[in-house]
Amino acid sequence: MNKTILVTGGAGFIGSNFVLAWVKQGLGNVINLDKLTYAGNLDNLVSLGRDARHVFVHGDIGDRHLLDKLLAEHQPYAVVNFAAESHVDRSIHGPQDFIQTNVVGTFHLLEAVRGYWNGLDTEHKKTFRFLHVSTDEVYGSLAKDDPAFTETTQYAPNSPYSASKAASDHLVRAYHHTYGLPTLTTNCSNNYGPHHFPEKLIPLVIHNALNGKPLPIYGNGQQIRDWLYVEDHCAAIRRVLEAGKAGEVYNIGGWNEKPNIEVVRTLCRLLDRKKPRADGHSYAEQITFVEDRLGHDQRYAIDATKISRELGWKPVETFETGIEKTVDWFLQNQDWVNNVTSGEYRNWVQTHYTERGEEMA
Ligand code: NAD
Ligand code: DAU
């Protein structure tokens, strides 16, 4: 077996950051299978140019025939599964794609990988890894003083998105327990950074601020998320792949709990400094409280003690350094933003925010 990995969903936000770092650090070849949904974008990979260490394949993790062919042809020593429908609000509007990709797709991927893995010789069977990238949302919602989620916190998903991710985590667990497939599961908190699709809070707020549009805060803005810079998440995944114990789960988080309104005010302050409004007023004047998300989880918090103690991983960025890098990236990459906010994106913001009483298209 060679130094090749198969990555799924590698044209999306986290997947593309992972692929870029993997290739740039010379860690081996990447076969990148992505369906290129609205969230997948080949522009995210453009800095790789024609680097032969990266092979992009347009396709679906639910396509068993394609998976069998890719695995047989490239003989990867690991599969890292990022492919998913990932936006909670979209899952509330229409859960079907979430079930199809996150549950059925993961099942087909596991079946293909199991077939491939069964055909490996004893040594390669032992070193092979299937790493499933999951989320802290599977654990449900915390009250203000509850302890943070650990790897043994009971699953209690509350949205169609988190329920579909929970189902995929259970399948991964079962494939390890039943068939002995050497799986690893990571459950991470909210990421932010370059290539973040502007339907999610942080990039949406940056984009709307610069375009003179409302900055929509659901409910009272007091919901809490634990924010992690995307490159720290990718480093954690690499570390788990390298040294994680087969069958184990690792929580990944930034120790950075913030209420949404505080995140948005921080973004406004940074933008006021770096790209002041023409009228000299603060971007904070664009903040608008809108109708809450259905079933909105109040608080997520990750206890990342296990990955830190057992694998020695810790985030490099604080929220302050990471958010500044992120704002700088968005200011310097307005062409990227303009490309991804044309077309389908406009339909989404029009439908979703008009329902909340805001005109944003
Ligand atoms: P994203 O929506 O930006 O990207 C998902 C990618 O998967 C896209 O490139 C898309 O084209 C691709 N894809 C979708 N369906 C596919 C299919 N059937 N076959 C092949 N490719 C398909 O998502 P993201 O934010 O980069 O998240 C990546 C993974 O990390 C997801 O599994 C998500 O649940 C998990 N996660 C995300 C966060 C976060 O804050 N964004 C935090 C923790 C975990
Ligand atoms: O916790 C990990 C999860 O983080 C990932 O599994 C998901 O894929 C990812 O999308 C993210 O989910 P969230 O729902 O937490 O992220 P989002 O950016 O959509 O929202 C962050 C918070 O901001 C949440 O409390 C809802 C709120 N929000 C969001 C939007 C888009 C607003 O107040 N206004 C908005 O317009």
Image (cartoon, helix red, strand yellow):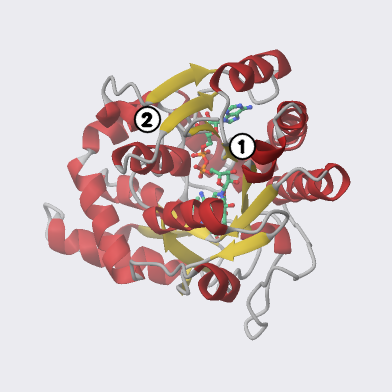
The x and y percentages for residue 272 are 18, 62
| Whether residue 288 is situated above or below residue 199 in the rendered picture | below
Residue located at (27% from left, 67% from top): 321
- Quick check: is the Cβ at mark 1 less than 8 Å away from ligand 1? yes
Residue located at (21% from left, 59% from top): 271
The x and y percentages for residue 117 are 72, 32
| Whether residue 57 is situated above or below residue 1 in the rendered picture | above
Quarter of image, ligand 1: top right
Question: Which mark is drawn over residue 340?
Answer: 2
The x and y percentages for residue 24 are 29, 39
| Whether residue 339 is situated above or below residue 58 in the rendered picture | below
Q: Quadrant of the N terminus?
A: top right
Query: Which residue type carries mark 2?
Result: Val
Q: Quadrant of residue 298?
A: bottom right
Per the image, label 1 sits on a secondary structure element best described as loop
Q: Left or right? Give the position of 287 relative to 145.
A: left
The answer, for residue 274, to whether it is visible in the render is: yes
